[in-house]
Image (tube, helix red, strand yellow):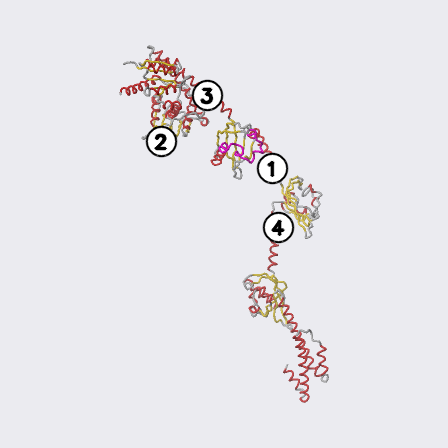
Amino acid sequence: MAKKKVLVVDDEIDFLEMIRLRLEANNYTVVTAMDGNEALEKFKSEKPAAVLLDILMPGMDGIDVLKKIRKTDDKVPIFIITAFSNEERFRIANKFNASGFIVKTNDLQREIQNITTAIGISESFKGQ
Amino acid sequence: MKNLAKNDGAKSPTALSLIITLLVIVFIADILINILTGLFSLGPVPESLVDGFLVIFLAYPALYLLIFRPLSREIIERKRSEKELRRLAAIVESSDDAIIGKTMDGKIVTWNHGAEKIYGYAAGEATGKPISIIAPPERKDEMFQILDRIKHGVPYEHYETIRMKKNGEKIHVSLTISPIYDTSGRMIGISTISRDITEQKITEELLRHAKERAELLFRISPSAIFTMDKDLHITSWNDKAEKITGYSREDVMSKVCPVLAGLPCSKEGNLKINDDAKPVMGHECNIVTKNGRTLTVLKNIDYLRDSKGRISVIIESFEDITDSKKLEDELRESRDYLNEIINSVADPVFVKDRQHRWVLVNEAYCSFMGYAEKELLGRTDRDFFPPKEADLFWEKDEEVFKSGEENLSEENFTDRSGIVHIISTKKRLYTDIKGERFIVGIIRDITERKRIERLKDEFIGTVSHELRTPLSITKEGISLVLDNIPGPINEQQSRILTVSKNNIDRLARIINSLLDISRIESGKMDIRHETFDILAIIRQVAGAFELKIREKNLAMRTSLPKDGITIRGDTDAVAQVLTNLIGNSYKFTNNGFIEVSAKDAGDSVEISIADTGIGISREDMPKLFEKFQQFGRVSGPGEKGTGLGLAIAKGIVIAHKGKIWVESEPGKGTKVSFTLPKEI
């Protein structure tokens, strides 16, 4: 089975590296982007099966990226990477149909499982 | 009279007819004169006129002298008496006094107009009746005694008694009762002159009462009272005056007042009373008592004047105010002392009455407001603050007035220059001795503290965020190694990395707690409104602890209703409250059990976490929900807390509009309970 491609967007290079290792260990191919514009470009060119998107980024932030991706694709699972929960951001993320959240301090392995499930659901919809 | 004539005529039959004729003529003439003078009240008949007629009968001098003349005189006398009687009758009739004639056995024979007026009986009604008709029932005997005494010839003069009018009304009368004698000196009746003295009696009674009252007041007055004549000689001196001054009545009576070593008032030693002297009220001065003690007295002076307006009596009253004056001085001193303290307080202090008017403000309050004390006293917040602010202050005052409970609130306060301060006001109710209620308030300007708190919150927020990212990276790095992703590691490496990872988790939790408390305190706690079954959350959190609890050889009990209880709130936040509380129980319980219970309380759900742990001492209880408070720190292995768990739990519960409280007994255990409304 071909590896699923995941786009991870975060301005923290070390975090990108860690999550890349974690995802690859879970049999994903990882594409990274460090700002909003790069993220939109990679989303277009790489056509990932899922996007992990940091909210707080300089320049175009995660919410803007989310809005823009949703304009062209309302199915792809998009997970918001956040350091801590914030009601306002949650609401906006939900409004633009985010699939879930990845809380940075949580156990990433467990968070990855949620991503896998979401991709599975998304794929099954595609298959129909 | 006829018989008499016949007898005279029998003396000489021949001359008899002539003599009789002449005698008859003279007699008739005499009678006519007498009748005429009597009828027309011409006064006493001139004897010369009668005598004129007698000249005609000189021939019959002896006869005249023997028979006619005496007879004529008798008639004249009788007529004169009758006339006199009529005159008397007229006087009697016109008298305002009741003049009553009665027989010896008390039957009324005469009843004048005055008697009619006084007793109400008409003459026709009273005449012939017993005199007892005017005696009140209880005085019938008295009447018989009077009659008896009169029969013995002893009259009464101005005898005062009570009689009864026809209408039953009793009246006071003064009686003069005398026997009536006929010409032979025989007692033939009784006359009574009654005067109605009811009005006089009432007046006398009123005067007597007034006098008695005045005497009584003089005697029992709590004030010393004494009187002096116009020459300042003391004429009366009451008991209280004796008591206060130590001078007895004998000491002072008839003495000139100022002679008595400053009595009643040393200042008035040379007192001279002029007739135009004005009353003196509330004059304070010193007097020296008999034993030489100086007293402060408060005195009044007034005067009685004669009909010409000259002072005849000087009345003075005085009270010993030495003690009350001393007390007043002490009170003033203590008030000044208190004012000094209040004014030295750096925080603004105020007292408001029930109408929200300032009745006391300290100097700090005046400078805080930017107004002088006199500008504030008697006015209210509404005279100075923007309506919204004033209404809020008003509302908070009302809460205290109504509940009687102390209130601590944070409010905005716009000062005179328009700068808005954040103030913390503590208000409490004060009820004075008369039952009037006041609010005592103390204000603390917390603007600066708030600014620092805000900075601190921002700092914590930023720092926490910045800490979390490297923390999560570090943690994930270790996790990757532990999960053998870069390659296999040995057991020791794994153990070391596990300890590292656990401590990173611990650090993350501390950071989370700091963030939570920071959000709670800055009021930025976001509560999601989700609908969930609280029992499911309880089971989930309790379940997560179950293994750890069992490892510590403790029992985990749950006492939950069968049916779920749906509430609205923030699932994660509620789970955190439960985690913190069960975590505390776990930490402080070494044997026994931890029990989580919940019950449906109608509009809310009540949840309790009870343990058989070490408990909390009485002195620690009030600080329990304060942040960074740690009680009964447990030594040895196990995670140390941040002292934020209960503060966060309270913050979350309050954000859900619930309540949280603790019951604890040292050595026995602790029970923390909280409520969550079903709808927020």
* Precedes in sequence: disc 4 or disc 1: 4
**Quadrant in which the C terminus of chain B is drawn:** top left
Q: In which quarter of the image is residue B676?
A: top left
Residue B391 drawn in magenta:
yes
Give the Cα separation between the discs numbered 3 and 4: 85 Å
Residue B61 appears in the picture as rendered? no
Q: Mark 3 points at which residue?
A: B458
Q: Name the residue under label 2.
A: B599
Secondary element at tag 3: helix
Furthest-bottom residue in view? Answer: B14
Secondary element at tag 1: helix
What is the number of callouts on the image? 4
**The disc label shown at residue B328, or none:** 1
Secondary element at tag 4: helix
Q: Which amino acid does label 2 sit on?
A: Lys
Magenta segment, prevailing SS (helix, strand or loop)? helix
Disc nearest the viewer among 1 and 2: 2
Q: In this view, does A17 lie to the left or right of B40?
A: left
* Precedes in sequence: disc 1 or disc 2: 1
Expressed as whole percent of the image width and height from the top left, the position of residue B63 reads 70, 83
* Precedes in sequence: disc 3 or disc 2: 3
Expressed as whole percent of the image width and height from the top left, the position of residue A27 reads 31, 14
Q: Mark 4 points at which residue?
A: B214
Closer to the camera in the image, B231 or B476: B476
Furthest-front residue in view? Answer: A72
Discs 1 and 3 share one subunit:
yes
Residue B413 drawn in magenta:
no
Residue extent of the magenta highlight: B366-393
Task: From this view, report whether residue B536 is shown above or below residue B166.
Answer: above
